[in-house]
Image (cartoon, rainbow, N blue to C red):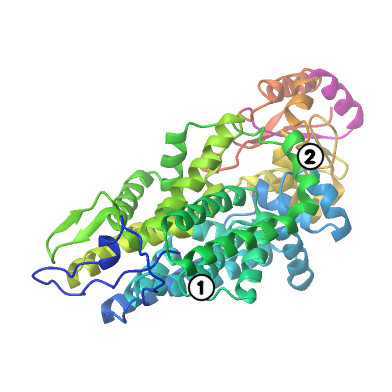
Amino acid sequence: MQDPSPAAAEDALPAAPTDPADDAAGDPPTTDERIPDPPRDRVRPEIVVVAVLAIATGVVLRFVTRSGLWLDEALTVNISSLPLGDLEQALRHDGHPPLYYVLLHGWMELFGQGDVAVRALSGVFGVASLGLAWLYGRRRGGPTLAWCYTAVVAMAPFALRYGSESRMYSLVILLVLAGALVVDDVLRRGRDGWVRLALAAVLTALLLYTHYWAIWLLAAVALWLAWTWWRDRRPTTRRACLRLLGAMVVGGVLFLPWVPTMLYQSAHTGTPWSAPVRPTTVVALTLADFAAGAFPDAGLVAAVTLVLALLAVFGRAVDGRFVTLDLRTRRRFRSEAVVTVLALGLGTAFTYATWSAFATRYAAIVFPFFMLLVAGGVTVLVARWVRFGALVVLLALLSIGAVWNVRDWRTQSRQFAEGIEEVAQPGDLVVYCPDQLGPATSRALGAAGDDLDQVVYPTFGPPQLVDWVDYADRNALADPDLFAAEALARAEGQGIFLVWNSSYRTYEGQCERLLAALSAARPSQEIVANPGGRFYENGAVTWLPAP
């Protein structure tokens, strides 16, 4: 990325040294010169000790959670377990690119499909990200920043959540860090040979094949490279910018075979499960998820990380007691700040303009850059024990969300399964309303589900997959009374279990009507699993015994 400036002194000084890169912020160099790597600042032992403890804890926590697989995870595993030749067709009905599914398919061939096994792939990606984070932090500000940055990424609840979930977001973080290192190699270190450029092209394609929000990150990087080319008069820098842009174009060409599928998904799947959110809400939710996760006081931790990030962008140490604000921004972290704001802004503007939903997990594309700013804010504090104290407090706050992630129940599916298994008889009918409760619950039922007739409302399809194609239109045409009549005929002489939740979009009032229609024919009923508000994915199970 941009040229780093000399690392700040560790101890309080009468006046902190001037940062030449900051002073030159408004006047790009006109000669073909390279700013050297940051000097080997003397990293304090207490920083290393705390960072090592945080990193070790973060590694362990990437493989620990007590929750079963929730909807998205179970769907991912079920799709990935299909033959590779069937993946493209399955993903046309799901809405994602294929890379993570292909990798998980191979992983499950080796290690099986247990909860721990399927989540471990993301854990491995998360651990690998820590090594790249250290390298990137070292390049951007020396070993002190490297240790602080790696510790922050290790304990960030966002990274822990998706490092312990069978989804692609941990892979996104890994690829973004790898791409940042390659860009740094080409643009700042002058290593613009064909190997680095080929890596840039491949990483561009891999990001696109992993998640579609990579489009907004790549667009932000392209805009930043174009701006750098226009502002910087150094021939080597301008050549590096053009070569990187060319490599990104090649990466886009490699993605072209998947474009027809992406266009079909865009036209027919979308995000019917949620409404669009305002840009300010996007920022607030993303900050909270990055720093704290789902625990009730997430806003406090999010505010602390935001202050530190702003300090990295605008703050300049005067001495051990004073920090001034430079409204021009500091050059050291300017590129990460610009790319973060641009990528998140472009993605948010598109989703709002197309009336699509936003989930904070999409912001994985900028997570590595934002957390670098947070760690950079710690290093702005040059007094030895103030810096150490700030790092300890930050890690302590992050650990609250980390523990919450381990304890959090992402789905109530195990309770659903236990309630069904307790009274079910072979041949009983299990109906999922909405169908989104099917993948996790059918997985939790395991072998016991083989003796049950499991279907989803409104299609009577199997519960392992959700067909998102024209989802809202299909549900709007559904008739709960007709479905109930067919379900009663299908379950003649057998019990019926309705696994349901009334709060899902596009099902407004339908699951209640379905329950009422079934109850009219079978007034004797029992709730075998009560709604659980502490679960992210929750609902109830109503048992209607055979008459």
Callout 1 secondary element: helix
Residue at the location (14% across, 63% down)?
318
Q: CA distance from mark 2 to mark 1?
A: 37 Å
* Farthest residue, direction left: 14
Which stretch did the figure color magenta?
480-502
**Which corner quadrant of the image does residue 208 belong to?**
bottom right
Q: In this rendering, would 115 be left or right of 468?
A: left
Label for residue 264?
A: 2
In the displayed structure, would residue 103 be above or below residue 68?
A: below
Residue 302 in picture, x, y percent from top left: 36, 48
Residue at the location (89% across, 25% down)?
486
**Closest to the observer: 100 or 109?**
100
Q: Which residue is mark 1?
A: 185
Residue 405 appears in the figure: no
**Closest to the observer: 242 or 301?**
242
**Which corner quadrant of the image does residue 243 belong to?**
bottom right
Q: In this rendering, would 20 be left or right of 521?
A: left
Quarter of the rendering occupied by the N terminus: bottom left
Which amino acid lies under the numbered mark 1 shown in the image of this protein? Answer: Asp
Residue 497: in magenta span: yes
Which amino acid lies under the numbered mark 2 shown in the image of this protein? Answer: Tyr
Residue 158 appears in the figure: yes
Residue 55 in picture, x, y percent from top left: 43, 72
Residue 538: in magenta span: no
